[in-house]
Each structure stands twice: as structure tokens, then as C-alpha cells.
């Protein structure tokens, strides 16, 4: 990631009250002994941050 990309990522970071995390699926693969989860995180509101 470039330094410009890192700056953009910091500007787009979310606070806990700005999104709602919902589990879509929890998958167990007993043969491979692995698990995975799938989430959605719809935005509920954004707070502008000016520096």
C-alpha cells in the first residue's frame, strides 16, 4: 500500500457506532477441521473527521 493509500485508509476508519455487524453464515468443515464466517457491515452513520 502506498503512503497515499495508507492515509486514505486512516481517513475511512469507522467508529463502532457507525456500522452494524451482522453474521450471515458460520461454516464448519469437519473433514478439514476448518471454520469460516461471513459478515455484512452496513453503515448506520458517518462522522466527518477534519484535521
Image (spheres, rainbow, N blue to C red):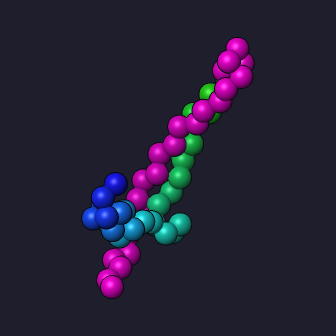
Q: Quadrant of residue 37?
A: top right
Query: Residue 4: which quarter of the image?
Result: bottom left
* Front residue of 29 and 4: 4
Q: Residue 26 lies in what quarter of the image? A: top right
Residue positioned 34% across, 54% down in the render: 1
- The reply to whether the magenta stretch includes residue 12 is no
* Total tally of numbered discs in the picture: 0
Q: What segment is highlighted magenta in the picture? A: 29-51
Task: For the C terminus, give its image quadrant.
Answer: bottom left
* 26 lies above or below 23: above
Compared to residue 36, the image places residue 10 above or below, namely: below
Q: Is residue 14 left or right of residue 25?
A: left
Q: Is residue 25 visible?
A: yes
Q: Which residue is painted at 35% across and 79% down in the image?
A: 49
Residue 24 appears anywhere in the view: no
Q: x%, y% of residue 34?
A: 67, 26
Q: Which one is in front, 33 or 1?
A: 1
The extreme front residue here reads 2
Q: Main secondary structure of the magenta part?
A: loop
**Picture layout, residue 42 above or below residue 12:** above
Q: Where's residue 19, x and y in %? A: 47, 60
- Of all residues, the one furthest to the bottom in this rendering is 51
x%, y% of residue 40? Answer: 47, 45
Tell me the residue at 57%/42% (across/down): 23
Amino acid at each position: 500500500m502506498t503512503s497515499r493509500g495508507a492515509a486514505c485508509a486512516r481517513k475511512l476508519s469507522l467508529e463502532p457506532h457507525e456500522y452494524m455487524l451482522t453474521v450471515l453464515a458460520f461454516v464448519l468443515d469437519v473433514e478439514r477441521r476448518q471454520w469460516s464466517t461471513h459478515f455484512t457491515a452496513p453503515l448506520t452513520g458517518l462522522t466527518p473527521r477534519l484535521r
